[in-house]
Amino acid sequence: MSENDTPVSPSGHPATPCSPAADSPFRTEPTSRDEAPQYVLPLVVHIEKTAPPARTDALRTAARAVLVMLSDERSVGEGEWARAMRDWQDARIRKVVRRARGAEWRKACALPGITVTGESAEVRVFPPVPLDGWPKELAKLQVSGTDLDDPEPPAAPDPAGPVLWLNPELTMSAGKTMAQVGHGAQLAWWELSDTERKAWREAGFPLSVATPDAGRWRELMVSGGPVVRDAGFTEIAPGETVVVEGAHRAGSLSPSAERLGG
């Protein structure tokens, strides 16, 4: 679940507010960004033994949590989290997902952050912290043990909004996959105009997560959409994990009643 990996966009689309440059976090070779202080975006998923969330809903909720953090007023301009967000994005883009239950979850919720709620999942996202500077309440949480399942087959992805497609040839823990779809959501966010971002946020950041068959995956890989490429530090070998399709459809979505939390 530890995410020391870097999303990349080989399509040539702008993956950041500026065009990809020699020091972009979306280049796979070493760059000056590796010399900067490294930060990580912590996410904690609420998993009770007796009532774990559905896997696909946890993935969607984690992706939405990243978007909520990116768009929060405290993360931009002169907001209280803005400096940490800039430092995080000036280096490699890293995310780590941990799990909590009971008192652990309540302690995590007492820290500054945002809880995002799905149909069955709760994910709390926190402002970035140094790699070696985790709050003690989060540092002791387990990275392993997120073996989630879908009790029923997930619904087909909604073509009206962005879809985060998972590589069908990979087997990853739910936590690892949550970090990967968080990367994909971030790539989609960076590709949008301010108007499209506003519309997506007001709609509650609806998105889909799905796994295509092998043939469809090959089509997606050459479709020109943003791609997350894992660096191979945890669980799997280096390679592509997520393709984002239809990011720009976010601008035409209607407002939703989905809860973003606080």
Image: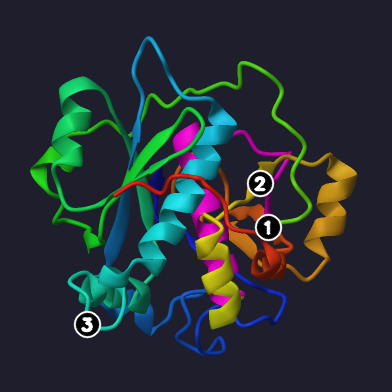
Q: Image quadrant of residue 79?
A: bottom left
Q: Which residue is mark 1?
A: 162
Q: Quarter of the image containing the N terminus?
A: top left
Mark 2 residue type: Ser
The answer to which quarter of the image holds residue 38 is bottom left
Would you say residue 168 sits in the magenta stretch? yes
The residue to which callout 2 is attached is: 208
Label 3 packing within 10 angstroms: few (<14), some (14-19), many (20+):
few
Q: Earlier in the sequence, mark 1 or mark 3?
A: 3
Q: Residues within 10 Å of mark 1 (few under 14, many from 20)?
A: many
Amino acid type assigned to the residue bearing label 3 in the image: Glu
Q: Quadrant of residue 162?
A: bottom right
Q: From this viewpoint, is residue 118 visible?
A: yes
Q: Which residue is mark 3?
A: 78
* Highlighted magenta segment, given as a residue range: 163-191
**What x and y, as percent, mark residue 141?**
22, 33
